[in-house]
């Protein structure tokens, strides 16, 4: 009846170079002992660029450049001057946000409406926020003269490439550290464009270094003896390995790992808005969100009603070209991730749960997975326990608030949770008992640079964002 | 599912018999979270409707316009001109559809009826002591009958907000039932005046109340108070008609009125209809815009799409 014509964002707003080097000491350089790899567009499988792979020698160069910049320039620089650079970077990000958003969608597969309306505004906001702290550190609650740590090694994931970069680099620089950052191997492009922005902002050489590569590059970076601080966002498995490797060293460590969040809907919830929250909780960014509401706990007395509304709403989700402004669900980031999602979903079906997806045509090329829900799931099913990191929701029911808390907490993870109810007192009662770093009430997946974010248990430790986020980069 | 739907149907028809039953039902409806509803409405407003979709949306929006003038200064000449425009919104382009209806005060109905005679454009009249509704029921019903007798086939009534806000739901209900009866064959649009109801919970309750009492359409506003139609209010009303049809099988129309002036706004509403209640409501029989200046912007954008250039405002009729 009312078909939306294609409304693609122009990809000509961004220039992608055929090949990228490593960003070390303010310059793009060729890797000395590494090779290269390709970054592809997951929606089409076309190659976007050839990316340098940093070997241990390159990592060493980068760490040494960061050390020199820390000792000679950035460490001694007054906070108010560091702030000027950060404000400048924040403004350039805003000015070039369209370019960055298109590049993010191309490299990651996320819909342009999310990179444009969520990722980029938050990236700029993070830099603005921490720019404001740079000259106010004595008032942050960590003593009269808190000192930076030195060189920070930062390894970030592929789900929010530029946003995770901002979460890592902005507080580190504000506190007076210099950084060596490794973006994920499937999504390095916005980090490399960010390197160009650092040049444009005249950021002193060596303050930000970007080394691209896969797991080996990351390992070389976090194990480098010249590093004072390690910050990692990614899988719990890799997080464990990093924790082991830095154990017994002087390196300070923060980890932001996986999750299996419960989104809890009570019978007095505003149903229409709760359904929006469920959809946003699990289908935002194709479910590639560590704090995704991947377990829906719905009170049994309203379960049928909620599910009916949810299915109707899911039928409205538009899957396809990430650059189309009307796309709600983009591409899965990689073939490997798609395989993982398929494997766990098939396990869910094999274990006797009921699988449902709306009618949804998947493009021929690229990596795609239809939004999917599983009903009849219990705590004993794999899909209720393991992080799927895709657009797959497991639906469980509960009878009482105490049972909801018990089921929500019955996971090794503890990153986030959501509560939907019209009763303010119940929100507070629940929030006290949920073992999750972030608890959202009548909303989900809300982020703000002023608000600390981080996990309990196997979801990691340390907080990012807010005043708390400074602690990870100060010697306190 | 069918069994529950049937039993729900018989249950709902009993609700109007007692104040307690009505109150229990209306207050048992799921609440509306203000932040969430506004966020969803804003989200729907970011859809990008271009080229063929835009052309289709503009023509549909023109067919949905209730071309309205509700001024003390309305004269036979003024409303005749408006009715002529309703029939041929763009004299230069015969492919341009006519609008949905002309909406005027009861005293102006006979003049409009002369012009619209034999056409498919409906004739709507406000009634029931519009816009405040602060008159005795007899007067409101006489107002309604007079408008129908003069030729109106759609009546836009106002609910008794005084009774609604005082919690006398049965009184509001009974007035709607009586007005519906006074309408005879004419369609009844029930104006909730959402700007005075203030909360989305009230909007949802008033929507259900109007539908339970037999309203054929629910309409946001009179256009005579500062806050008229807004996207979130319309969203809540669309959710209500959707749920009402699921419960009773009866489809009710929705009319946002007041404050919708641009093609861009109108298209946002159509997207909201499309993604909230679906194509069944994308028809002038089930969705209308109460507006006056909107029409010329729609015509201007329509000409732009066909010719590739914007024509100046002088190329569009002012009536």
Image (cartoon, coloured by chain):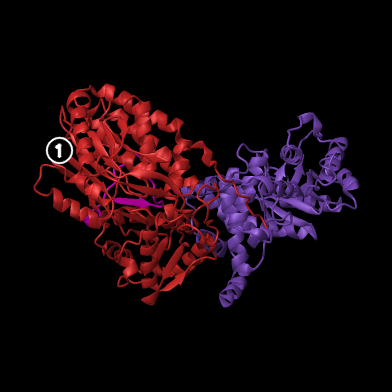
Which of A70 and B292 lies nearest the eye of the viewer? A70
Q: How far from the left and from the top, in percent, is residue A362?
A: 52, 61
In the picture shown, does residue B196 fall above or below A206? Answer: below
Instruction: Tell me which corner region of the image, top left, top right, bottom left or bottom right, holds residue B224.
Output: top right
- A445 falls in the magenta region: yes
The residue shown at (76%, 36%) is B71
Crowd band around label 1 with a 10 angstrom C-alpha radius: few (<14), some (14–19), many (20+) = some
Q: How far from the left and from the top, in percent, is residue A436?
A: 27, 54
Identify the chain drawn in red. Answer: A
Residue farthest toward the left in the current orientation of the protein: A248
Q: Tell me if residue B174 can be seen.
A: no
Query: To which chain does the residue with label 1 belong?
Result: A
Q: Tell me if residue B303 can be seen.
A: yes
- Determine the secondary structure under disc 1: loop
- B298 falls in the magenta region: no
Give the main secondary structure of the magenta stretch. loop
Which of A434 and A295 lies nearest the eye of the viewer? A295
Which of B105 and A441 lies nearest the eye of the viewer? A441
Instruction: Tell me which corner region of the image, top left, top right, bottom left or bottom right, holds residue A22.
Output: top left
Which of A399 and A367 lies nearest the eye of the viewer? A367
Name the image quarter holding the C terminus of chain A.
top left
Name the image quarter holding the N terminus of chain A.
bottom right
Q: How far from the left and from the top, in percent, is residue A123?
A: 38, 38
Q: Is residue B205 left or right of residue A64?
A: right
**Which residue carries the number 1 mark?**
A226
Q: Is residue B183 left or right of residue A135?
A: right
Which tint is chain B?
purple
In the picture shown, does residue A295 fall above or below A463? Answer: below
What stretch of residues is rendered in magenta? A438-459
Q: How far from the left and from the top, in percent, is residue A406?
A: 27, 65
């Amino acid at each position: 009846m009312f078909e939306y014509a294609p409304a693609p964002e122009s990809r000509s707003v961004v220039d992608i170079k055929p090949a990228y080097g490593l960003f070390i000491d303010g310059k793009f350089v060729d890797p000395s002992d590494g090779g290269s790899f390709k970054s592809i567009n997951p929606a089409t499988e076309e190659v976007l660029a050839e990316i340098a792979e940093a070997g241990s020698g390159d990592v060493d160069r980068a760490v040494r450049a960061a050390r020199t910049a820390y000792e000679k320039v950035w460490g001694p620089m007054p906070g108010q001057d560091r702030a000027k650079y950060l404000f400048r970077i924040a403004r350039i990000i805003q000015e070039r946000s369209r370019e960055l958003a298109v590049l993010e969608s191309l490299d990651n597969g996320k819909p342009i409406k999310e990179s444009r309306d969520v990722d980029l505004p938050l990236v700029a906001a993070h830099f603005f926020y921490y720019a404001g702290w740079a000259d106010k550190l004595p008032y942050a609650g960590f003593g009269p003269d808190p000192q930076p740590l030195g060189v920070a090694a930062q390894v970030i994931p592929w789900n929010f490439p530029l946003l995770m970069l901002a979460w890592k680099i902005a507080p580190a620089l504000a506190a007076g550290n210099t950084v060596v950052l490794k973006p994920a191997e499937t999504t390095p492009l916005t980090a490399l464009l960010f390197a160009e922005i650092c040049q444009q902002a005249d950021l002193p050489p060596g303050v930000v270094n970007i080394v691209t590569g896969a797991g080996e590059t990351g390992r070389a970076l976090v194990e480098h003896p010249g590093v004072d601080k390690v910050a990692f966002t990614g899988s719990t498995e890799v997080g464990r390995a990093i924790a082991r490797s830095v154990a017994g060293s002087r390196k300070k460590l923060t980890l932001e790992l996986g999750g299996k969040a419960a989104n809890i809907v009570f019978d007095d919830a505003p149903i229409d808005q709760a359904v929006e929250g469920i959809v946003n909780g699990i289908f935002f960014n194709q479910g590639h969100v560590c704090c995704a509401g991947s377990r829906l706990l719905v009170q049994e007395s309203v379960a049928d009603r909620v599910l009916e509304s949810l299915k109707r709403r899911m039928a409205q989700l538009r899957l396809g070209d990430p650059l189309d402004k009307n796309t709600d669900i983009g591409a899965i980031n990689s073939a490997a991730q798609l395989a993982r999602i398929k494997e766990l979903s098939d396990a869910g079906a094999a274990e006797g749960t009921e699988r449902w997806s709306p009618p949804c045509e998947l493009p021929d090329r690229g990596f795609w997975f239809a939004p999917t829900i599983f009903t009849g799931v219990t705590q004993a099913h794999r899909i209720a326990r393991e992080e799927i990191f895709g657009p797959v929701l497991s639906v469980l029911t509960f009878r009482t608030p105490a049972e909801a808390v018990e089921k929500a907490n019955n996971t090794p993870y503890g990153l986030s949770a959501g509560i939907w109810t019209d009763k303010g007192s119940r929100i507070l009662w629940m929030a006290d008992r949920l073992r999750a770093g972030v608890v959202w009430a009548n909303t989900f997946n809300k982020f703000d640079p002023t608000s600390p974010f981080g996990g309990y248990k196997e979801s990691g430790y340390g907080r990012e964002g807010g005043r708390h986020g400074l602690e990870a980069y100060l010697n306190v | 599912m069918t069994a529950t739907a049937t039993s729900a149907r018989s249950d709902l028809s009993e609700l109007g018999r007692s104040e307690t039953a009505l109150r229990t039902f209306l207050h048992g409806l799921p609440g509306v979270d203000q932040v969430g509803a506004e966020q969803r409405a804003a989200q729907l407003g970011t859809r990008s409707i271009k080229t063929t979709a835009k052309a289709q949306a503009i023509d549909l929006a023109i067919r949905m316009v209730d071309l309205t003038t509700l001024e003390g200064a309305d004269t036979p000449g003024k409303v005749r001109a408006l009715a002529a425009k309703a029939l041929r919104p763009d004299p230069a382009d015969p492919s341009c559809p006519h609008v949905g209806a002309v909406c005027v005060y009861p005293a102006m109905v006979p003049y409009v009826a002369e012009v619209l005679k034999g056409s498919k454009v409906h004739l709507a009249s406000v009634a029931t002591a519009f816009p405040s509704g602060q008159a005795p029921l007899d007067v409101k019903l006489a107002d309604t009958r007079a408008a129908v007798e003069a030729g109106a086939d759609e009546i836009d009534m106002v609910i008794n907000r005084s009774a609604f806000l005082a919690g006398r739901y049965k009184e509001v209900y009974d007035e709607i039932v009586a007005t519906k009866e006074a309408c005879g064959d004419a369609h009844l649009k029930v104006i909730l005046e959402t700007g005075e109801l203030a909360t989305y919970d009230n909007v949802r309750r008033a929507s259900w109340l109007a539908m339970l009492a037999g309203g054929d359409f629910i309409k946001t506003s009179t256009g005579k108070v500062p806050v008229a139609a807004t996207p979130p209010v319309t969203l809540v009303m669309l959710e209500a008609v959707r749920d009402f049809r699921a419960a009773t099988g009866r489809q009710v129309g929705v009319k946002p009125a007041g404050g919708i002036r641009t093609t861009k706004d109108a298209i946002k509403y159509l997207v909201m209809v499309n993604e909230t209640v679906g194509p069944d409501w994308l028809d002038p029989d089930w969705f209308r815009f109460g507006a006056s200046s909107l029409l010329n912007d729609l015509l201007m954008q329509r000409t732009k799409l066909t010719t590739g250039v914007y024509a100046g405002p002088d190329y569009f009729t002012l009536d």
